[in-house]
Image (tube, rainbow, N blue to C red):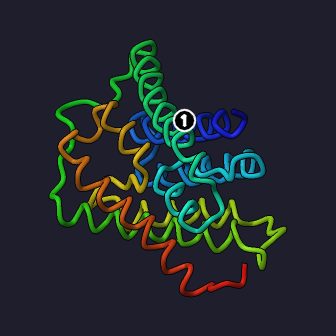
Amino acid sequence: MKKYIVEFIGTFFLVLTIVLAVNNGTPPGFAPIAIGSVLMVMIYAGGHISGAHFNPAVTLGVCLRGKCDWSDAPGYVIAQLVGGALAAIVAGLLFGMSGMPGPTGPAATVAFAPACLAEFLGTFALVWVILHTATTKSNAGNSHYGLAIGFTVTACAYALGPFSGGAFNPAVATGVSIANMSAWSNMGALLVGELAAGALAAVLFGVVYGNED
């Protein structure tokens, strides 16, 4: 249960930061820094308890890599999705209570092919970095993995966000859809790219890292 609580809290604050930072008047271009930063600190806070996935695609990759029991996967994914959904609801309450407009207008739509490819690339980079920095014996005791992972999300948000919204995470995709930042019709492209990337990153990790661990 402790692992699921950590996954819920970490995902909640990740999605809350995304919804608020993108829509609360944060200076243009600074939202990815806030998003990468909150992911970093939540990883440092919860990594030693749950592995700090905060992302169903990461959970998929880590399970395929053999560093998370498949029996834990449903609890992880449920905690992540509920955390993301509740964060979107709380963000809406904050906007309503403050009188700030929050997300306005029709939810953004994206073209399937570029969005799917962008989500695949960003999620692959994220899961690849996580597997190599946070799950290997050769990096045991590495105190910088949270920074590496947070910066991966920041860099990919800047580079790929314009094509897909830069979710790189099914829980984030769910949260931003609830928050009316992304149309529900985008979910197919986002999920296909994210989950395929998580699986491929684990497979290629196995090829590169082999049986060393």
In this picture, residue 180 sits left or right of residue 90:
left
Q: Quadrant of the C terminus?
A: bottom right
Name the residue at 52% across, 57% down.
58
Task: Between residue 73 and residue 183, name the one nearer to us.
Answer: 73
Question: Horizontally, is 148 left or right of 114 in the view?
Answer: right
Q: Residue furthest top?
A: 97
Report the number of numbered marks: 1
- Residue 111 lies, in percent from the top left, at 15, 58
- Which residue is at 43% across, 36% downward? 19
Q: Quadrant of residue 198?
A: bottom left
| Relative depth, front residue between 2 and 169 | 2
User: Residue pushed farthest right?
Assistant: 141
Q: Position of residue 48 (x, y in %)?
A: 78, 51
Residue at x-position 28% and y-position 57%: 164
Is 188 situated above or below 125?
A: above
User: Label 1 neighbourhood size at 10 Å, few (<14), some (14-19), many (20+)?
Assistant: many
Label 1 element class: helix
Asked if residue 169 is positioned above or below residue 87 in the image, the reply reads below
- Residue 91 lies left or right of residue 4; in this view the side is left
Q: Residue furthest front?
A: 71
Horizontal side of residue 115 vs 3, given as left or right: left
Residue pointed to by mark 1? 79
Location of residue 6 in the rendering, given as x and y in whole percent from the top left corner: 67, 38
Please state which amino acid type lies under the numbered disc 1.
Ala
| Residue at image point 43% right, 52% down | 169
> Image height check: is 36 above or below 92?
below
Q: Is residue 90 above or below residue 80?
A: above
Of residues 166 and 188, the one nearer the viewer is 188
Residue 1: image location, x then y, percent: 69, 33
